[in-house]
Each structure stands twice: as structure tokens, then as C-alpha cells.
Image (cartoon, helix red, strand yellow):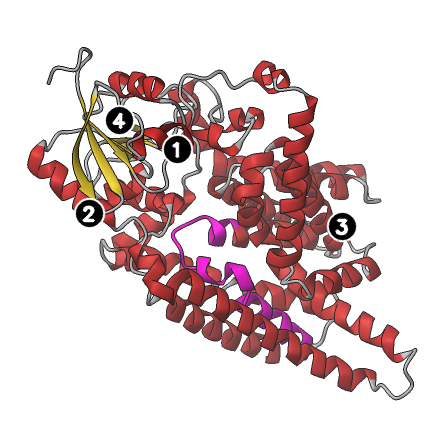
Amino acid sequence: MKPRRDLLWLFLLALAVRLAAAWPQHQPAYMDESYSVVVAQNLLAGRGFVEDFLWNYLDNPAPPPHPSHLYWMPLTSILAWLGMRLFGAGYSAAQIPFALLSALLPLLAYRVTRHLGGDRRRAWLAGLLVIFSGFYFPYWTAVDNFTPFGLFAALALFLAWRGMDSPPPPPARPLLAFLAAGACAGLAHLARADGPLLLAAIVPVWLTRRQPAARRWAGLGLLLAGYLLVMSPWLARSYRLTGALLPVAGSKTIWLTGYDDLFSYGRELSWRTFLAQGWGPILQGRWWALTANLQTVLAVWGMVVLAPLALAGGWTRRRHALVQMVGLYAGLLFAVMTVVFAFPGARGGLFHSGAALLPFIAGLGVLGLDTVVAWAASRRRHWRAATASRVFGAGLVVLAVSLSLFIYNGRVLRNNAWNTADRGYADLARWVAARKPDAVVMVNNPPAYRYHGGGLSVVTPNEDVDTTLRAADRYGVDYLVLEPNHPAPLHPLYTRSADHPRLRLVKQFGGTLVFEILPPGGAP
């Protein structure tokens, strides 16, 4: 009964902390969040998966409104819709499913620690380290894919291990764990496009284990069946809309020569343009991604001190199937986000997907602390290993709580940063509605503009003025909005050191300039 009671209390503590963290968050704070929320609002209104904006031009899209989630995956919007459907139409209601699901991750850390040989105290430590998880702390209750991907990806790895290491009789029970693992991998893929990496980590470990061939292939078949059971409807939808099982827009980010290429217009992004830049820039970009991602692993995944402890704990348990799968997944994720998707990976992809590793890093870190303390105690006679382990374990929790609150204060509370992000779009939307209600606007963050009351919009491309106007003409744009954070090629226009006969400054909101786009020839 004690483990069940522990899990209940741990869940209640985690949920209380998550709800407290969500309380001061009143709106989406960045583009990913705004996108998920406004599509959820469209679902709630009965419009289906549709978006009233363009935030990139990678797949040469038709003018808005048009089908949503041809780049990002849909589970975040589905969860937000569920929260709004049950609890009301506001942002806070959309957060509730994320608060509930994220409160389950510490329970998984508890279970992982116990299964890897830790006692109740160590399992509690691991759970607390996931509740107070440093840089992730403000984002568990964000309407983003941190929570759903983190939970379902971690469950996929854990359940696959349960299928591997459970005793065969009765034979159906461990094999059914593979079906559940596949379903969780499918849910993880519905949250993030890199979800198939989970299968790439599970399958090799399973196939290399000694076992009857029939059991090996039955487990593999159930794993894939569970995955396809969840993913098939979305794959069918993608094929119907694009002619491909998965949209091609995301794959084009392999060929970016810089992160801002994500917002380019009319450019070819292919292996030819990628190689045309030369090996020097290619290697320089991968080196930049490598250094940035190493910092993410050390500081974000491992909160600096937890990372080496987790390595120590993992090394001493390197023959454990769960540790092997987690290690393989972490290695694959790091390699893909460094070499293949270097720029989006280093600018947030590794951060988002790394959420799945936190229960395992916490559990292995707590157990690795014992390994390190035992090693140190063997060289220092006056050390008492058990006492030192308790003291340093408490220190880890204090460090995690302090770091989490520091990060939360900076990202959410200080200067009301979370709730003032993109707030200027509300004034812009009202001005546009009064001047021309059906206007199409070109802005930095189209989903946020829509969330704050705006109409149809497209993203400002990272291009020069002439190319920007070609995009504006194609999509029927009426106003170009240049904000303090504007594309570099448009900086002369923003500073008014250059002008264009088709652009007339008609409004200024603080540091935001609004240009009316005139027809060719400059006549209104």
C-alpha cells in the first residue's frame, strides 16, 4: 500500500504545483502556443482543423484560411480543445489537461527509480526533481507539446521495457505492454513530428534480446499495431490533403542554411541549395548546433549537476534494457537535432523533445548520486556514505526548486513577461477592424495576431522589400507591420533610411510601424 499512497500524494503535490504555476499565466506567450490555442478555438467553434493565417511558406501554401497542422502535429490543439470543451473557452481552461498530464510525469520517475533499484526515499527524490524541473518548469502548463510528448514518449519507453522484462507466463500480458507502448509512441508522434525516433530506439533493443522468434515478432507486430492504431487517421488525413502520409514542409528544414530560412519566401530549399553553400558554412552550422545542444543537455536536461550523476547511474546499469532504450533514444535525438535538423533542433527542438527524458534522468541521477558518494566515501574514511547521500539528495531538491523558481520568475512573473507577450496585437487588430475589417495583415507572429482579435494574416518573410511585396501581392495583403523584432533585410525600411513607392506609413504603435501596401504604380 505504501507505493500506492506515495504515488497518490506525489500526484496531488505535482498537480498543486502545476495549478499554482498556471494561475499567473493568462495567455499564450509565444508562437507555438498561440497556434495551438487558436486552432483549438476553431475546433470548439465547429470549424475543424483550420488556420486563419500563414506562419511559413515552406509548402507554397494557398491563401488562408486553409487546413491546419501541415507542419506541427495536432495533439496539443486537441488537448486544448478538450479543456475548452469541458471547462470553458478561455486560455486557462485549455491549460487544465496539460496540468493534469504533467502531474503524471513525477509518478513515472518514482516508478522508474523503484524498478532500477531505488528505495522510497530515492523514488521521492526523483519525483520531486521532475516536479521542479528547472528550465521546463514554466512550460508544463503551457499549451505546447512539452507535456503530451514528454508523458507519452516516456511511457512508450517504460511500457516497452515492461514488455521485455516481464516474465513470459501468462504470455499475453507482457506482449500487450508492447501494444500499449506502440499506442503511446503514436500519441507522442501526434504531439511531435520526431515521435518515430521512439520506435527506432525500442526496436533494436527488443530484436537483440535472446528469446523465441515467435515472441520476438509478436512483440514487434503489436508495437507497430499500437502505433498505427493511433496514427492511421492522421496519416490518412495528411495523404488526402497533401498526397503524402506526412507533410513535406517539415522535412524541408533539413536544408536550411540558417534558422531564418524557415520564414523565407519563394526560395528553393533542397539538397542542391544546401550543398551550394559549401562545406565551410555547413560544418560551421553543425558546430554551432553541437555547442548549443551540448549546453541544452547539460543545463536544461540535467540542471548542470544532475547530468553527470545520471551518466554515472546509467553507466552502472548499462545492461538494463530500459537504460539501453533511453540511452539510444537520447543519442538518436541528439544526433538528429544536431546533424539533420540543426537549426530548428538547436533553437528549440531538442528542448521540447528532451522532456521525455526527464523521468529517467531524475531516476538515474538520484541513483548515480549513491554511486558517486560511495566512490568518494571509499577514499575518505571520515565520510558516512548513507548520511552524505541524504544530505546531497536534499541539496539536489533545494537546487532544483531554486532554479525552477528563478526561471519561472524570469519567464512569467518579472515585468509580467508571459502576459504581455504580443499584447500590442490587440491594439493593431482593433485599428485594422475599424479601418478595413476584411484586411489581410503581414506580421511577425500571425497566430498571436489571430489570438488577440485579428483577422487573416501571413508572416513577414525574411526577404528584401521587393520579395516581400511579391508575397504580399500573392496573398492579398493590405498592411505590412514591422515590429522592433523584424527581419534583417527589412531593417532599412524600419529605420526609415529607405522607402518604397508602394509602401505608405499610415500608423505607428510605439515601436511598431504599419505600412499600407499600395497597388503597383503607387496609386491608392
Say whether residue 467 is left or right of residue 152.
left
| Mark 3 touches mark 2? (CB < 8 Å) | no
Q: Amino acid at mark 1?
A: Pro
Discs 3/4, front: 4
Question: Residue beneath label 1, please?
Answer: 487
Q: Residue at horizontal 76%, vertical 59%?
A: 311
Question: Residue beneath label 4, please?
Answer: 64
Question: Residue beneath label 2, please?
Answer: 426
Discs 1/4, front: 1
The span from disc 2 to disc 4 (Cα, nearest Å) is 20 Å
Q: Which residues are magenta?
A: 121-149
Q: Is residue 290 above or below residue 506?
A: below
* First of labels 1, 4 by sequence position: 4
Q: Is residue 246 above or below residue 304?
A: above
Give the SS element for disc 4. loop
Residue 405 image label: none
Q: Is residue 294 visible?
A: yes
Give the SS element for disc 3. helix
Give the SS element for disc 1. loop
Q: Residues within 10 Å of mark 4 (few under 14, many from 20)?
A: some
Q: Amino acid at mark 3?
A: Gln
Residue 324 image label: 3
Discs 2/1, front: 1
Say whether residue 3 is left or right of residue 101.
right
Question: Depth check: 243 or 466 in front?
Answer: 466
Q: Position of residue 21 (x, y in %)?
A: 40, 67
